[in-house]
Image: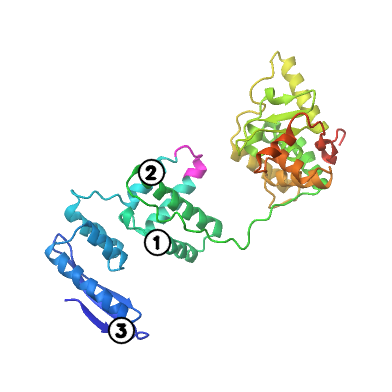
Amino acid sequence: MATLSRHPYKGRFRVRYKITYPDGRKVERSRLARSLREAKALFARAEMLEEMTRFGRYNYEDVLQWKAAGLLSGKDIAPLLSGFEHDMPVYTLREAATAYLSASKHLSEKEYKARSTRVRNILRILNPSTPLSFLKPSDAEILKNALIQKGLSVTTINKHLQDLRRLTEMAVTSGFITYNPFIHVKPLRNRNPFQPRVLSPQEVERVLSEARNSRLLYGWIYLIFLFAFGCGLRRSEILNLQWEWIDWDRKLIFVKRTKTGKPRFVGMGEKLYRELLKLRKKLEERGETPGGRIFPPFHPDSVSTAAARIFRRCGLSGVRFHDARHTYATHLQILAGASPVEAMARTGHSSVDMLLHYSHPANRTIFEDALPYMREGK
């Protein structure tokens, strides 16, 4: 029989009760309450749970209510639902996680491995046999606290929460649950966010000089850096560049494939312009017509790894390849005199569609020529 007693620790009240599984096994559980009123309400529910499980007179909704009241743990749910599995199929967290990972096959090997590790952590903390419909927003807090205790960074914890929200959203789309309990869960606030590094013109010169003499990426690393520092292009945008997008007369590049899906124009500094002319001439001398992608199909991670080696050789530890983009955006305004609107139009940071008009070929100002490290002869 369920019992209600005063717990000696901090004056709380304790409710003890037994749960009878469909296979006849009995387990004892106890829950604490802060006040007598709360304890009495919990005791009444516990008596009902004890009686109904004893005679097997409960249904799916009863289990749902007991879970919400905090009377059932994750390991109690699956046994209790096994009695009427044929009436109510249960979609568990493990099944949702498996479906989520199956839909993540498009990711790179590195990204997929990282996501798989995060999903395993989620299953370990929230119990893989938990029916998805039993999850509550408070489970996200349980996940947060457990990951904080493991010493993970704020960014990593937020990626776990993002994965949890995505896999439950997939279950909603598939019709296994009607509502995503984590749709409004807020990420942790990063009080020490990563600060991008803006290199000085002298540091950029040093990097370009080192890259010019390097054989990394079969010698392509120098041209990649020219696009990064001289045009502010993202890594993926550089690797997807095509010869047909170059306007040789106006010294412009039409970047069609962008992260935001919004194409834009950027100018070519004299140094980049001359390098591309030399490359085109070499191809023509070999009897090839320049067309398709400018760069070989390098893996994006290979570019970042090669760039990191160049930075280390220049004594610039901690600098990322993406910092070249921040450097470009800053120097474009400080050294070249571009307005924020013109700079945003070239970097693709703008969220206002009309700003794209500033990167139209009619805008003949090539601010990139004003960057000291993009002038020919340097």
Residue at label 1? 139
Cα–Cα gap, marks 1 and 3: 26 Å
Residue at label 2? 173
Residue at label 3? 7
User: Magenta segment range?
Assistant: 105-112
The reply to whether dot 1 and dot 3 touch (C-beta < 8 Å) is no
* Residue type marked 3: His
Q: Secondary structure at mark 2?
A: helix
Above or below 171: residue 6: below
Q: Earlier in the sequence, mark 1 or mark 3?
A: 3
Cα–Cα gap, marks 2 and 1: 21 Å
Q: Quadrant of residue 98?
A: top left
Can residue 232 be seen by looking at this rendering?
A: no
Q: Is residue 341 left or right of residue 118?
A: right
Q: Quadrant of residue 52?
A: bottom left
Cα–Cα gap, marks 3 and 2: 45 Å
